[in-house]
Amino acid sequence: MNIATKDRTEPLRVRPMEPASRLLGASIFPSTWAGRAALFVGLATILRWIVAISTGLTDTEAYYSQWVRVPALSYYDHPPLIAWTTWLATRIARAPWAVRLGPVLYAPLFSALVYRLAARLFSPRAGFLAVTLLTAIPVFFVMGVLLNPEGLLAPLWVLFLLLLLDLRENDEPWRPLAIGAAVGVAFLAKYTAILELPVALLYVAGSGRTRRWLGRPSFYAGGAVALAVASPVIVWNAAYGWPSVHLHLTERMGHSPGESLAGALWRVGSAQLLIFQPLIVPALIAVLGYAVFRSKRDERWRFLATASLPVLAFLWTMMVRAGDSEPHWTMVGYVPLVIGAAGLIDANSGDLGRLARGAFAAALVLSAGVLGVYAVHVRSPSLAKTLASYDPNADPLNETLGWDRVNAAVGAHAAKLGRDAVVAAAHNVLCGHLQAALDDSPAVYCPSPRRTEFDFAGRRDPPTNAPVVFVDSDRYPQDAAFALPRLACTHVQDVEIERSGLRVARYRIHECRPREERRP
């Protein structure tokens, strides 16, 4: 009774209701910079996964994916880690999404390590900004989808930088051994990792706080660890006469016919602007200059300058010298500069800070706009039709189209030539894509003018007296008579790939027989 009376007489106390926007924000948007970075990376990963499952393989992806057919300690073009990890992924399935499973998973790991490094050097907010800026750079987004050695190298490179930074404040003798292991694994991903050794030496020797390591045996033992981990590549190359060394330091050196030094500089510079974004590249070069300027007074900037300048200088030089260089080689050299840019945006509240924030926002808007335009292009060729300068051979989307038709046509001509027929092309990535599309049935050979991985897999020259279905394309033209001089080849079919009336690819098919069997 007393309770009932009390309930009736005491005023009802109602807590004020939280604003709906505050409740919604608390439930959806993380309150920490680490949480915001994780949310951003998660959204980017979902977007990458959508791209990975909705598009076919590019030519280069198909070429790399076929290395799993020949387990080896290393491969002609690259070290073995890309093949080993792809072999594991394709145990799940052999579809394009399985081939790309590794890159899609490496990308968030890379972002997490970049966040950690930027947060240690500057602040958690700088970590968030670094992750956002990296994702806005086109090549970093794309390399988180496509099968490529850079997707593996990127997180391993940042891990190396984190371990190297630890040498300044820590003295445990195992730390150089961990750095050596990281360098060795990175070298299994791509030969560019060899540049980590001079970066480590320059950083350690550049300051009294780190120079103490030069007198410790464990620092040099780290080099032995790196050599041991990288030994599969060394053993394979030694067994075949160092072909990968000759490829990267000799065979591919030299400008394209008629290309001057000025032309080579333009080729490299314009490609850097294109794939790293024209608003971002000049800003990152400015950050490099700032890092060099501050390196004498600020250990953080010395670290970033040491991790970037030697790497970019070497790679830019090699790219100018190599006529077939690829612009994404410099990815790892820009990572420290992106972190430095994030640090500048985070720390400056004056005119420099406003300028940096404005450039950052403009870069994000431009990248989002480019992504939107390309998404429209993927769904419809209407934009391409309006461009008089559109070159279908320069559009990577077209590499993914029409392979069911190519497969059917090649299979029909192989059946016509008989059960001993094989398939051939004369460019490594075209050979790789044919092998992927046909599932290597009939067997694919690659009599290219230059050596390819097919040479080391025993698939250079087709078997003697075997009839051959030879394939070339507008993108990779080659004379069948030149590629197969002992055979008599007849052009029998063109497979034209169109998108709503726009021809985006053409594959030419030839039937080639031993000369004594040639039919009138």
Image: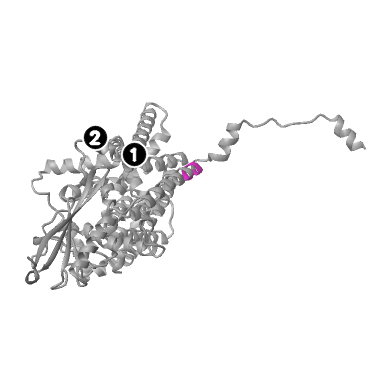
In the picture, measured across the screen, residue 391 lies left or right of residue 142, that is left
Which comes before the other along the chain, label 1 or label 2? 1
**Secondary structure state at the residue bearing disc 1:** helix
Type of amino acid at the residue the image marks with label 1: Val
- Report the magenta residues as a range: 34-38
* Residue 170, horizontal then vertical, whole percent: 44, 54
The answer to which image quadrant residue 191 occupies is bottom left
Q: Is residue 192 visible?
A: no
Type of amino acid at the residue the image marks with label 2: Thr
Image mark count: 2
Instruction: State the separation of the CA atoms marked 1 and 2.
Output: 13 Å
In the picture, measured across the screen, residue 187 lies left or right of residue 452, that is right
In the picture, measured across the screen, residue 23 lies left or right of residue 450, that is right
Residue located farthest toward the top when viewing the structure as drawn: 351
User: Which residue in the protein does label 1 denote?
Assistant: 376
Label 2: how many Cα within 10 Å (few below 14, some 14–19, many 20+): few
User: Which residue in the protein does label 2 denote?
Assistant: 386
> Where 348 sits versus 46, above or below?
above
* Residue 477, horizontal then vertical, whole percent: 14, 53
Judge by depth and name the residue closer to the eye, 434 or 60: 434
Residue 400 within the magenta-colored segment of the rendering: no
